[in-house]
Image (tube, rainbow, N blue to C red):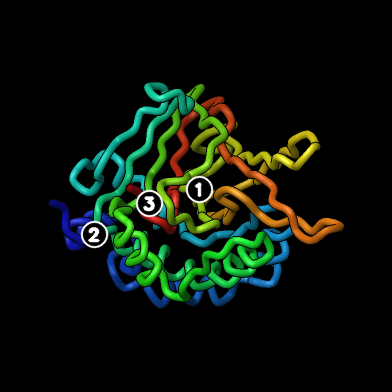
Amino acid sequence: MSTLRDTADLLKAAPDTNHVAGHYDSSIAERLQRVAWENVERDLDHYGNALLPKLLTPQECQALVALYPRNDIFRSRVVMARHGFGRGEYKYFSYPLPDLIGDLRSALYPRLAPIANRWHQSMNIDTRFPQQHAEFIARCHAAGQLRPTPLLLQYGVDDYNCLHQDLYGEHVFPLQAAILLSEPGRDFSGGEFVMTEQRPRMQSRPEVVPLTQGDAVVFAVHNRPVPGQRGAYRVNLRHGVSRIRSGSRHTLGVIFHDAL
């Protein structure tokens, strides 16, 4: 089984990544403190997604991509075409998560939990979320959702990801994040992050979110509230990735609930 020390040793091979290798916790927290969270909340309310520019450095992105060939730190590999998910593949990390990914998960969650609770209140959903991620994960594990869900995705030419929702059990945190680890125009072309929003009695609304290396997009997993004449109503969202036209594309997915 992989250890955090093993992962740290690999990440130390990249220049200027000591904080990735285990000393970056405050750095991630400082970056999140600099985010204009009022704008993030506004964009999530209006569009179902929000951009966090340059959340990771290029060195951190490269170090994460370098993990993909390893098998000892992942619990499973999924080839999308075998399941009708699209083309390309991804791997789910095992516990313990690499430090950078675990800290991203635990540092982002408290920023998003108040938004998630407000959304659930607006949509008349009884579930509320604790302020700390460890408490929410304990809830997942008590319900049998024991498998970690953070993942690395890898796409090549003509690969794509069908529109979908990352629902893994009864307990679902309504927001998640994806971080682009490759640089558009240099590492790949095409491969845009896309979302659709299915509105009641209306045609679906498409959304393309432009990302550069290190950018994170926070987005709705399933539903979000939209104000209506009789209060808020729910709209259904899905996300995916358009066809890769050249090169290769890697992404880190940060999902806050664990899987059955």
Which callout, 1 or 2, points at the residue further toward the start of the chain?
2
Which residue is denoted by mark 2 in the rendering?
A: 96
Circle 2 Cα neighbour tier, 10 Å, few/some/many (<14 / 14–19 / ≥20): some
Quarter of the rendering containing residue 122: bottom right
Q: Where is residue 61 shown, x and y percent of the image?
A: 42, 52
**Residue that appears at 69% across and 51% down:** 234
Q: Where is residue 251 shown, x and y percent of the image?
A: 45, 44
Which residue is denoted by mark 1 in the rendering?
A: 180
Please identify, in this view, whether the residue under mark 1 or under mark 2 is nearer the observer. Answer: 2
Circle 1 Cα neighbour tier, 10 Å, few/some/many (<14 / 14–19 / ≥20): many
Measure the C-alpha gap from mark 1 to mark 3.
14 Å
Which callout, 1 or 3, points at the residue further toward the start of the chain?
3
Give the residue type at disc 3: Pro
Circle 3 Cα neighbour tier, 10 Å, few/some/many (<14 / 14–19 / ≥20): many
Which callout, 3 or 2, points at the residue further toward the start of the chain?
2
Please say if 227 is above or below 195: below
Which residue is denoted by mark 3 in the rendering?
A: 150
Q: Where is residue 114 shown, x and y percent of the image?
A: 58, 72
**Residue that appears at 65% across and 62% down:** 124
Q: Secondary structure at mark 2?
A: loop
Quarter of the rendering containing residue 5: bottom left
> Residue 59, can we see it?
no
Q: Is residue 79 left or right of residue 221?
A: left
Please say if 229 is above or below 26: above
Give the residue type at disc 1: Leu
Q: Secondary structure at mark 1?
A: strand
